[in-house]
Structure formats: C-alpha cells, structure tokens
Image (cartoon, rainbow, N blue to C red):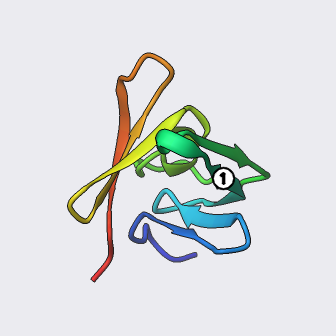
Amino acid sequence: MSGPRRAYVEFKADGEWRGSDGCNGHGGRWVVGSGGAFLATTGPSTLIGCDGVPVGAWLASSWRAGLAGETLVLLDARSKETGRLRRAD
C-alpha cells in the first residue's frame, strides 16, 4: 500500500469529475448553470482513513462556484465557503 498522495479534482467536459482526498478515490457528475449555479453528485468512494482534503464533500455540499484568479471557490446554499481548489500547474 502506498502513502497519501496529493488531493485533486478533475472536471471533464462530458460532465464527469474524478478526484482524490489524498487517500481515497472519488467521482461523480457535475453541471454549472447561469450565475455560477453548481451541482455535483458523488458516487462510490474507497474508504481509506487519512487526514486528506474532503474534495468529494466540498463538491457535494456546494451550490455555487466562482473563480478568484486561478482558484475555484465553492459556496454552499448560505454562501458560506465550502472549499477552494487551486488550478494545478
């Protein structure tokens, strides 16, 4: 078994997303609507315990998304920030 990896999320043009919290693989579907409306669903995930970044939970609880430079900012239904995802180099 290998150790923790870097957390990431990849949004594909066909509406699929895949990612990792650093230990567990995640995936699901996503769509963006007008004004930054955002909806993501999550599918099955592996269940390795670690102190990773909760990428799947951030996406599933987000209602809006916007950009702050190269950073994707996710907001919940009350406009509270749920997470930030920085574009990989």
Residue 36 to residue 18: above or below: above
In the rendered image, which quarter is residue 78 located in? top left
The residue to which callout 1 is attached is 31
Task: Answer with the quarter of the image where residue 29 lies.
Answer: bottom right
Q: Which residue sits at x=71%, y=64%?
A: 15
* Residue 41 percent location from the top left of the image: 72, 45
Of all residues, the one furthest to the top in this rendering is 78
Is residue 19 left or right of 71 when viewed as pictured?
right
- Vertical arrangement, residue 80 with respect to residue 25, above or below: above
Q: Could you tell me the amino acid type at mark 1? A: Val
Q: Is residue 75 left or right of residue 71?
A: right
Residue farthest along the front direction in this orientation:
34
Q: Can residue 46 be seen in the rendering of this structure?
A: no
Query: Of 55 and 16, which appears nearest the observer?
Result: 16
Identified at 72% across, 54% down, the residue is 45
Residue at image location 52% in from the left, 61% down from the top:
23
